[in-house]
Image: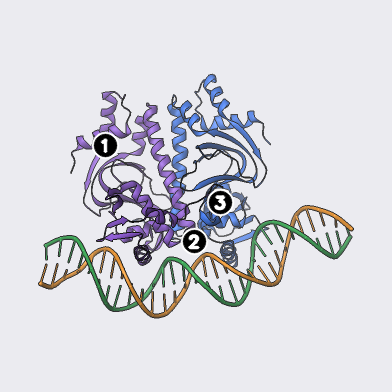
Chain colours: A purple, B blue, C orange, D green
Amino acid sequence: MMTFAEQFDRFAQLHLPAHLGDDAILRFRSLARPVDAARDVALGLDEGSDHLVFVSSGAIKLVAHASAGRNQVVAFHFPDELVVVPARAEHSYTLSTLRKSDLLVFDYASFADLARSDPAVLRSLLDTARSSLSRSREKSLTLGRKTATERLASFLVGMAHRIGVEREGLTFIDLPMSRRDIADSLGLTIETVSRQFTILRDLGIVRTVGKSGVQLVDLRALEARAGYLTEAA
Amino acid sequence: MMTFAEQFDRFAQLHLPAHLGDDAILRFRSLARPVDAARDVALGLDEGSDHLVFVSSGAIKLVAHASAGRNQVVAFHFPDELVVVPARAEHSYTLSTLRKSDLLVFDYASFADLARSDPAVLRSLLDTARSSLSRSREKSLTLGRKTATERLASFLVGMAHRIGVEREGLTFIDLPMSRRDIADSLGLTIETVSRQFTILRDLGIVRTVGKSGVQLVDLRALEARAGYLTEAA
DNA sequence: CGCCAGGTTGATTGCTGTCAACGCAAGTGG
DNA sequence: CCACTTGCGTTGACAGCAATCAACCTGGCG
């Protein structure tokens, strides 16, 4: 559990320009609402407006909802990242924690109004939006055109980059999300995800440790199965 | 075919703030490269850097490429819209025209550098990125969790909003893209798209006129089949 | 040590993909 | 002016991958 001061300082360091005056910083600070949530909790955000959420610690998922209880995990986010949470449109969105998390919640409109005065803050927001857009487009390709094996391989390669740690020369991932979350992120069922894990394990490409640990034994082979474009157009 | 002056004026009116000085406008103008392309042409953009493309006239598609020749249409764009075209990453992206189009191409980095001085330009860019992100997330839900019927219904409802025209009290859409483009956008095959059109036609929900015309006879029924979230969470 | 949510494995179904033929409209050239 | 071609869309038969339904297993926690 982090203090509000710790959280905001971290946020300011990463997402606000260094040159910002004390008064401006205080104004941003007054917009930040700290939320300290346990594992597997849906944040009750006002669905009528957009929000900006900074992840101080923990891990979260942004989920889109369709009819008949079908869910699609639109994005996972990890510490130090900033997330744009859209208001309800044709579908609604919820933000949930994957593990105990410390978050800072901003009202998007208020934040953007304050940022109006400072180009550097806007640049930072723009970069956040662009990298989310980029990941979302990659996800579209995955969901629209890849097989189950390729989806899981792409997922693991992506997670390796974002939360993987080196251990004895190999990449190790401690997945904060359940098989259901992975399935909802990849547009598959939990059973299919499980079977794909089994296939990769039997091929000796990954090793699973308990329910959440994954050791990437052969990253090359994993990438080869991810359906990436191999050669220039 | 529009003149460069016409195109840039339109762009400036929509995406640059009114208060911008003549010298600043001229600098943005000097970054704009006019491209006037025939139907079904892939723009040869440098894949090493991001671009910003303004659609003056026509219609375009942004396509992501996976291995084995699989393509995913990531976004369609129509006149007056601004598109962020990403550099090649794990997959590559190409921008192609759907019909004869007039475009203005900017190098993203140069544009953003110029915009550094003006918060209003950045706000505008940020809004562009946010609306693309929003559409991309909706697409993730469609690709990950919807059935073929729901995908086509969602697609038609979306297109109705963007390029539909009222005619005799009904919405009429003149689709600029082929069945293949629709399939590549919805993560389906052309045969499945065709069959779904037949189903909606047989149900009396839409009427097709030639290859590109679609008359939405019963918009309510179409929306009901789009898989939208019907009730509040 | 025993519970039990979460994960794995197996049998079967079904939606969409694949392969193939046909239809139709627009364009071309004799 | 019409036969031929060509590109796109539609329809049909069949196959296959992932979903569904159903046990069974496991490891993390009290």
Local secondary structure at mark 2:
helix
Q: Residues within 10 Å of mark 2 (few under 14, many from 20)?
A: many
Q: Residues within 10 Å of mark 3 (few under 14, many from 20)?
A: many
Local secondary structure at mark 3:
helix
Quadrant of the image containing the N terminus of chain B: top right
Q: Do dots 2 and 3 share one subunit?
A: yes
Q: Position of residue B168 (x, y in %)?
A: 63, 53
Q: Is residue A8 above or below residue B221?
A: above
Task: Give the number of the disc on residue B150.
Answer: 2
Residue mark closest to the camera, 2 vs 3 = 2
Mark 3 or mark 2, which is nearer the start of the sequence? 2
Q: Residues within 10 Å of mark 1 (few under 14, many from 20)?
A: many
Chain of the residue where label 1 is placed in the rendered structure: A
**Three-letter residue code for mark 2:** Glu
- Name the residue tied to disc 1: A32
Across the whole image, how many numbered discs are drawn on residues? 3
Q: Is residue A29 above or below residue A185?
A: above
Q: Quadrant of residue A128?
A: top left
Q: Quadrant of residue A188?
A: bottom left
